Amino acid sequence: MTQAEALGLGHVPDPSDLRLLRKALGQFATGVTVVTACECSDEATPVGMTVNSFASVSLSPALVLWSAARSSMRHAHFTQTPAFAVHVLRDDQEALVQRFTKRGDGFDGLPYTLNAEGVPLLENMLARFECITEARHDGGDHTIIIGRVTRFSMPSKGAPLVFAKGEFGRFLSET
């Protein structure tokens, strides 16, 4: 341990080794979502992505944001789509996380419906936010996507799925 670290002065982010920065960021617990859209093509294929970078921006107007990794195979779909939906997962829906990761099955065999904008909607989520893309911003190795919430719902009850320190878990309330 360096003297600066011992004094609590911290580390400088090192682009050649981001593991320590990732570990520090992992100390902050987040919820887990699946963001869905329709692929911008003639075939209108549904696409989804597991995301933990979701946040509220504004209540009036109703705006939310999330970040899409530029390295994702689905990045182009989400940065070009005019509409998307954010599905907040319950603590018993970890299997959906895996479906919408890089090597997951996605929508194969999964029931969904399409909203008026053609966005695939998943069932039985803790909460769902249907959005029109409001803005996109460069965010380094991510694109920050801001959506205007056009509809939202809370179709099921339960505890949220939480991600921290590289692991999934649940929020335990004392009430």
Image (spheres, rainbow, N blue to C red):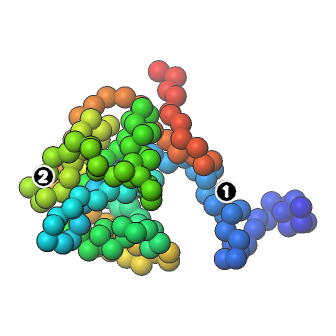
| Mark pair 2, 1: CA separation | 38 Å
Q: Residue at x 14, y 51 (%)?
A: 114
Residue lying at 80% horizontally and 60% vertically, measured from the top left: 8
Query: Which percent across, then down, holds residue 109?
Result: 26, 44
Within-10-Å neighbours for mark 2: few <14, some 14–19, many 20+: few
| Numbered circle sitting on residue 130 | none
Image quarter of residue 126: top left
Front position in the image: 106 or 16: 106
- Left or right of 156 in this view: 73: right
Name the residue located 85 percent from the left edge and 67 percent from the top edge: 4
Q: Depth check: 145 or 96 in front?
A: 96
User: Of helix, strand and loop, which one carries label 1?
Assistant: helix
Task: Tell me the mark number nearer the camera, choosing from 2 and 1.
Answer: 2
Name the residue carrying label 1: 23
Element class at badge 2 = loop
Q: Which mark is residue 115?
A: 2
Q: Quadrant of residue 45?
A: bottom left
In x, y percent, where is residue 129? Answer: 25, 50
Instruction: Name above or below for residue 120 compared with residue 73.
Output: above
In the image, residue 80 sits, relative to residue 105, either above or below, namely: below
Please give the name of the residue rendered at 47% of the width and 72% of the height, measured from the top-left corner. Answer: 71
Q: Residues within 10 Å of mark 1 (few under 14, many from 20)?
A: few
Q: Which is nearer the eye, 148 or 104?
A: 104
Residue 148 drawn at (x, y percent) = 23, 61
